[in-house]
């Protein structure tokens, strides 16, 4: 084992799990990146993928390939007209000048009511191009595409325009310095999650 990732953003209020955010004095890097012979790899789990801050931190920690492992169900999966997975996978790749290798659960509505998981796993390059994608639908499918880490590194070095990491103006975005969804501590339940979410919404008003 070369890396261990803990989900940072459980799908509150229904996922009643602790995040590194909820653990006082969490002593591991919550956004680890593994340096491997095929490139520097970071991982994210399911709901994490909707938070650009989480994925951006993985990229700023050095990830060249980001691997979201998800169970996105309909209507938020890979089916029209929403097709969140495709939109977000391409966006995260562009935002971070990184490859995205995204796997998504595929299971029939008949087996897991009230949801069906639409699969649609894909590989996206650093310009947001879909290199390969499984057809949406239940059943096991393999997705294979070439990844050229040397080209990625050359592009990161070469670019002046569209260098979104290098152009980040952190100081002008004060929202990240404020607390919204406060740590849960030991009080983990759907009820406490709902209270924390409502409190966070009030801070947005």
Image (spheres, rainbow, N blue to C red):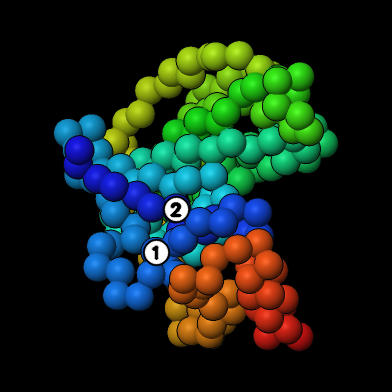
Q: Is residue 165 visible?
A: no
- Residue 32, above or below 170: above
Residue in the picture at 57% in, 23% down: 133
From the image, tell me which residue sits under label 1: 20
Q: Pinpoint residue 130: horizontal percent, then vertical percent.
A: 55, 30
Residue in the picture at 46% in, 61% down: 18
Q: Residues within 10 Å of mark 1 (few under 14, many from 20)?
A: some
Q: Pinpoint residue 14: horizontal percent, then vertical percent.
A: 65, 54
- First along the sequence among labels 1 and 2: 2
As helix, strand or loop, the secondary structure at mark 1 comes to: helix
Residue 149 picture quarter: top left
Residue 71 picture quarter: top right
Q: Is residue 175 visible?
A: yes
- Residue 201, above or below 40: below
Residue in the picture at 44% in, 47% down: 44
From the image, tell me which residue sits under label 2: 7
Report the residue that reaches farthest toward the right.
Answer: 81
């Amino acid at each position: 084992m070369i890396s261990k990732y803990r989900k940072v953003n459980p799908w509150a209020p229904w996922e009643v799990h602790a995040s590194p955010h909820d653990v006082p004095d969490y002593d591991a890097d919550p956004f680890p990146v593994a340096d491997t012979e095929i490139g520097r790899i970071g991982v994210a789990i399911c709901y994490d993928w909707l938070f650009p801050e989480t994925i951006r931190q993985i990229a700023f920690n050095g990830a060249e390939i980001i691997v979201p492992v998800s169970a996105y169900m309909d209507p938020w999966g890979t089916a029209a007209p929403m097709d969140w997975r495709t939109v977000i996978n391409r966006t995260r790749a562009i935002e971070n000048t990184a490859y995205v290798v995204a796997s998504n659960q595929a299971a029939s509505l008949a087996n897991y009511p009230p949801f069906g998981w639409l699969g649609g796993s894909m590989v996206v390059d650093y310009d947001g191009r879909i290199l390969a994608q499984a057809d949406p639908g239940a059943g096991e499918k393999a997705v294979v595409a070439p990844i050229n880490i040397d080209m990625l590194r050359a592009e990161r070095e070469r670019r002046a325009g569209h260098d979104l990491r290098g152009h980040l103006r952190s100081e002008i975005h004060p929202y990240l310095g404020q607390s919204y969804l406060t740590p849960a501590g030991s009080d983990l339940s759907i009820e406490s999650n709902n209270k924390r979410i409502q409190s966070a919404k009030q801070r947005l008003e």
